[in-house]
Amino acid sequence: MAPEEDKLVRHRLCEEVFNRADPARADLAVGDERCAARENEALERKIFGLALAITTEPSKLGQLRQMLVQLQEQREILEDFSSWAIGQIDERVMSMALEYAHDAEIMVQILSFKGGTFDGLLHAIEDLYQHEQISQRVYVKARLLLRTAGHQEASN
């Protein structure tokens, strides 16, 4: 059965129940709204998952993350969904960065697309080193790159 047909059948069943049991109508309507809200949330997550799957560039993930933050600030999307979605993006960016765990410059550049502050980026590098996901050589070089970039920003 096609999804549209399935929804139509469910809708008809709900109407039938409403017509038979008037006192319980309010309770069923609330339950139906909750069911619809859960279905919408599941659909939103599936669509977002698809968008995430086709995004192959860290810079595009950064743009998507920034857009989600703006929508959340404007209260255009639910905070629960946006927090979940941002977490998914951050995990994806981290995964991409770890593919370049041997190259400090590329890894730092990719991690910068997670957004956030300079301190947040430094903290991410430290976490990777603490969890032995990057070598000491890459850790030292990444910190040096970040300090150099931080000093250049401060002098501008």
Image: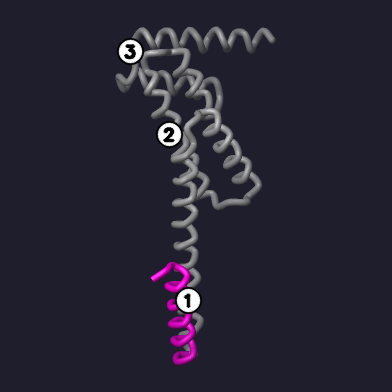
Which residue is at the far front? 1
Image position of 102 (left or right of 152): left
Predominant SS along the magenta part: helix
Q: Nearer the viewer, residue 2 or 36?
A: 2
Which residue is at the far bottom? 20
The image position of residue 42, as x and y in percent, is 44, 57
For the record, the magenta segment spans 1-21
Identify the mark nearer the N-term, 2 or 1. 1
Q: Which mark is drawn over residue 135?
A: 3
Q: Which mark is drawn over residue 34?
A: none
Secondary element at tag 2? helix
Q: Which residue is mark 2?
A: 92
The image position of residue 68, as x and y in percent, is 57, 42
Q: Relative to 20, does residue 119 appear above or below in the rendering?
A: above
- At label 2, the amino acid type is Arg
Neighbor class of circle 1 (other Cα within 10 Å; few <14, some 14-19, many 20+) is few
